[in-house]
Image: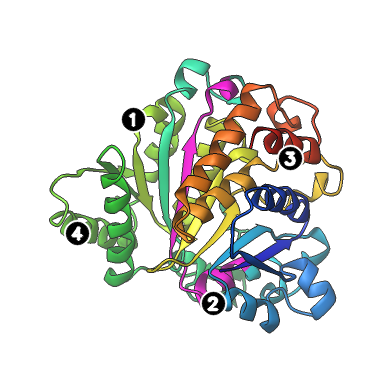
Amino acid sequence: MLIALLPGDGIGPEVVTEAKRVLDALNIDGLTYEEAPVGGAAYKTLGHPLPPSTLDVARRADAILFGAVGDPDCDALERHLRPEQAILGLRKELGLFANLRPAKLFPELADASALRPEVATQIDMVIVRELNGDVYFGEKGHRTTATGLREGYDVMSYNEAEVRRIAKVGFETARARKGKLCSVDKANVLETSQLWRDVIIETSAEYPDIALSHMYVDNAAMQLVRNPGQFDVIVTGNLFGDILSDQASMCAGSIGMLPSASLDDGKKGLYEPIHGSAPDIAGQGKANPLATMLSAAMMLRYSLDLPEHADKIEAAVAAALADGARSPDLGGSMTTAQMGDAVLGKL
Ligand code: IPM
Ligand code: MG
């Protein structure tokens, strides 16, 4: 089985290196790797953030382990050449529409959460975020108003098929957990959200065993810090999911801890930490590699059907934390490689 390694920009290469050490230590038969540049790193060497050669590796691979993209050097480029377009392009080109972002607090990290420990320890949820539609992929541009003002616009839309397929992932995810699904929208204001809510309710007829609720996104943001323990699975659109998953990560200790999977309708997936390229700390050995290791565990579980190896990584991460392994984001001073050593020591 082929794994595409796309380290990308900033801290991406550092964290992917540590995750690859962990994968190597598992000695899994039949895994092969191909590495390719992506994001600003690809723009600088090949002139495009998602060059055809990289897209080709990603298409051929059974799974993709992704670091991060984003590079301040590229901020002034036209939008289609900016690093972020690489991850958006991969999600769209490969039909990776279902983004699973689990947020669970490792008990040892209760003090790292922005919430009081008794609130934070309750967090154990999955955000199911739609990735191929919404305002991210609608018509967008700049124009001039009738009175001569510059105006930017991005069209938000979802069709019913797009909502139905992510709804099913939400319901199935809830079924495999505690059976509670909360759909987050802004149906009090947005037509896109009204259609979203209607289709979620229609789909719920196929899942009578799941307790479905609906929440406006502003309330959801508030409830995530007030009482995150109330959530089991949240299903939501691309933009709301982007925002709420960053928020959930800080409730769960650190953005350096949260993995994610972006899946198509089969077994293929792209696995990445939810944090970005963090250019301010790139190359300094300060990045926390645990989110990428946990993403590799998700890859073994969802794309490669190797749950026992996924369990080993997750257990080793928990054991390393229990032993006091802490990178700066967790209030410690261990380097990226030392965090890698700590996890390898537990494997
Ligand atoms: C994420 C990121 C991306 C997104 C960026 C890098 C385009 O924030 O994966 O959450 O907005 O989806
Ligand atoms: Mg984001």
Q: CB atoms at circles 1 and 4 under 8 Å apart?
A: no
Q: Which mark is residue 340?
A: 3
Region rendered in magenta: 87-110
Residue placed under numbered mark 2 in the picture:
146
Disc 1/disc 3 C-alpha distance (Å) = 33 Å
The amino acid sitting under disc 4 is Thr
Nearer the observer, 39 or 19: 19
User: Where in the figure is residue 29, as x and y percent of width and height?
Assistant: 59, 60
Q: Separation of disc 3 and disc 2 at Cα? A: 58 Å
Under circle 2, the secondary element is loop
Q: Is residue 266 in view from this perspective?
A: yes
Which of these two is toward me, 21 or 190?
Answer: 21
Would you name the residue on which mark 4 appears? Answer: 203
Q: Quadrant of the N terminus?
A: bottom right
- Residue that lies at the very extreme toward the right in this rendered image: 284
Q: Which residue is mark 1?
A: 230
Q: Name the quadrant of the C terminus.
A: top right
Q: Residue at x 46, y 70 (%)?
A: 155
Residue 108's quadrant in the figure? top right
